[in-house]
Image (spheres, helix red, strand yellow):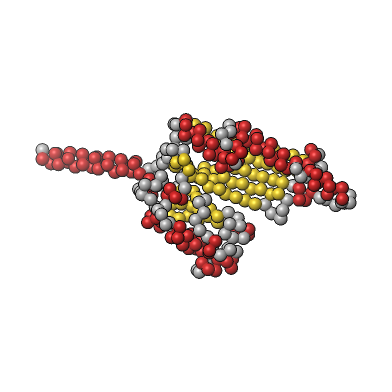
Amino acid sequence: MLHSNIKTTSILAIFFLSVVICSCKKNTETKENPIKFETITKNASYHLFDKEKNPNCELEIAFTYPTEYTDNNILKEIQNKFIVSALGEDYINENPQKAIEKYIKSYIDTYKELEPDFQKESESLSDDEDPGAWYYYTENLSNDIFFNQAKILSYTNRLETYTGGAHGAHAYNNHVIDLTTGKWITEEDIFVEGYTEPITKLLIEKIAELNQVDDPSKLNEIGYFGIEEIQPNGNILVNEQGITYTFNEYEIAAYAIGVTKVLLPYDEIELYLKKESPIAQLFNK
């Protein structure tokens, strides 16, 4: 009988221990936020003077935006942030579909302003000369959801443009939203006061590592403008791993270097993180 009780007690102990372990594991897991998205895809093109033989502009848009959320007021604010961050202040409070249509019209109308210059240049050239090389324009506008968990929404707006120059341009603009309030989350919300100097030092070290440079001062030898140009720029993404900084073309380096992305893991920056930060649940596990 005693042996039976001991056996029963052991089984119960193992059962309750398993429940505790499972509960702890469940509490540390992050789940996707209850927010739904749709994507508006549009393509537009226009030839100067509406003649197919002439140069043209081409616009491609793949705009993802939130359509459903548990709080309608916050949803409205988030939608507006997506629109303004991608298209600009001129489209504030616009319906997403209408905003995209207006943006397309504005893009083509702006391109049409080249017509007088194109006409003038065409008239001054001989029949075998082509004035069109500098009049072909393209734009590709899109966005990507980077992280969507723990009441945090982090995304990137991507803009690729060509306006007749030697090469195109690429820009990646990052954003982080607190889904409990619908507000932006900034560096100042995440880091303690005086964070700039230590985070700058870490960014420089990480960029040197990425480029396999043993001395950060040598970064200028491979195309960076100099370590004095590198500092926190607010262009951040967050996820469960850490904070990612993006430095766009010409921001800290020559065009040939391209975009520089730097991940700062939480365990390397924990001294500079606010305990009451909106993203605290991501690093206080």
Nearer to us in this view, 277 or 18: 277
Closer to the camera in the image, 249 or 183? 183
- In this view, which residue lies farthest toward the left? 1
Q: Where is residue 72 in the image (x, y as percent from the top left)?
A: 47, 30
User: What is the x, y in percent for residue 63?
Assistant: 59, 38
Q: Nearer the viewer, residue 241 or 91?
A: 91
Q: Which quadrant of the figure has residue 99?
A: top right
Q: In this view, does 255 lie above or below 185?
A: below
Q: For the point 61% across and 32% down, which residue is it?
A: 97
- Would you identify the image quadrant in which residue 139 lies? top right
Q: Is residue 100 among the parts visible in the rendering?
A: yes
Residue 212 can be seen in this image: no
Q: In this view, does 165 lie to the left or right of 64?
A: right
**Image x and y of residue 159, in percent:** 61, 46
Residue depicted at x 44% and y 31%: 70
**Quarter containing the N terminus:** top left
Question: Toward which corner of the image does residue 20 lie, by quadrant?
Answer: top left
